[in-house]
Image: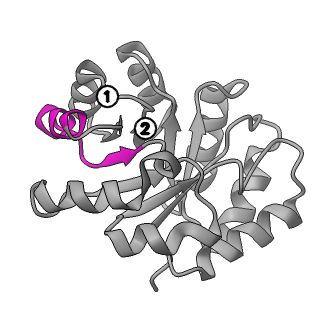
Amino acid sequence: MDIVAILRGVTPDTVIEVAECLLQSGIKTIEVPLNSPNALESIRLLQTAFDGRAVIGAGTVLSVAQVEAVAQAGAQLVLSPNMDTAVIQRTCALGLKSIPGVATATEAFSALQAGAHALKLFPADVLGAATLKAWLSVMPVGTQIYAVGGIEASNTAVFKAAGAAGVGVGGWLYKPGYSLDQIRQSALALVKAPVATR
């Protein structure tokens, strides 16, 4: 199961050391939300430093213009809190992986029809693992759903058991001001939790 580290609020002057810490702990997918300071620069730095070692994503992508900007910065994943057909289609046209946020079955099916590669159950802690399991029972075989929102090491197992392809972990793992040791300990706890299959 994939673990996406959501570095909301990260800055270009700290993003490399934070990402290196995560990679050393076993987390290989890193998302920089666009509402972080100088997010595009952080994405550029990550793609340059970790090309081939990590998958770099852009989060909170809300418009076609933002899709184009993150593509130029080197992002490989485009993640959104919402389902916007134009954003999904432009992401796919540029050869990037689209993971839009969905909160209803209707949004989920619409996102898949628009070409989304995977779905983001958001907010997962509100919608719950039962929702994810129910959706998977009626969606096309092979549909991948990531649980995002309120995820931490203690609740990953229930989402894995429901069939989640991965989880996105934000504030529990990283906030500006967290020490590298604190980030490392949280990352290791996630990797060792039942969510991580090796």
Element at badge 1? loop
Label annotation for residue 79: 2
Q: What residue do we see at 28% from left, 63% from top?
A: 133
The residue segment tinted magenta is 106-121
Q: Nearer the viewer, residue 44 or 97?
A: 97
Q: What residue do we see at 49% from left, 49% from top?
A: 148
**The N terminus appears in which quarter of the rendering?**
bottom left
The amino acid pointed to by label 1 is Met
Q: What residue do we see at 35% from left, 37% from top?
A: 103
- The answer to whether residue 16 of the structure is visible from this angle is yes
Q: How many residues crowd around disc 2 within 10 Å: few (fewer than 14), some, or many (20 or more)?
A: many
Residue 177, horizontal then vertical, whole percent: 89, 45
Label annotation for residue 55: none
Say whether residue 184 is magenta.
no
Q: Image quarter for residue 136?
A: bottom left
Element at badge 2? strand
Q: CA distance from mark 2 to mark 1?
A: 10 Å
Figure label count: 2
Q: Nearer the viewer, residue 123 or 4?
A: 123
Is residue 7 positioned above or below 19 on the image? above
The amino acid pointed to by label 2 is Leu
| Number of the front mark, 2 or 1 | 1
Could you tell whether 126 is left or right of 191 in the image? left
Residue 161, horizontal then vertical, whole percent: 37, 75
Q: Image quarter for residue 163?
A: bottom left
Q: What residue do we see at 62% from left, 82% from top?
A: 192
Residue 3, horizontal then vertical, whole percent: 51, 63
Q: Are marks 2 and 1 in contact (CB under 8 Å)?
A: no
Q: What residue does disc 1 label?
A: 83
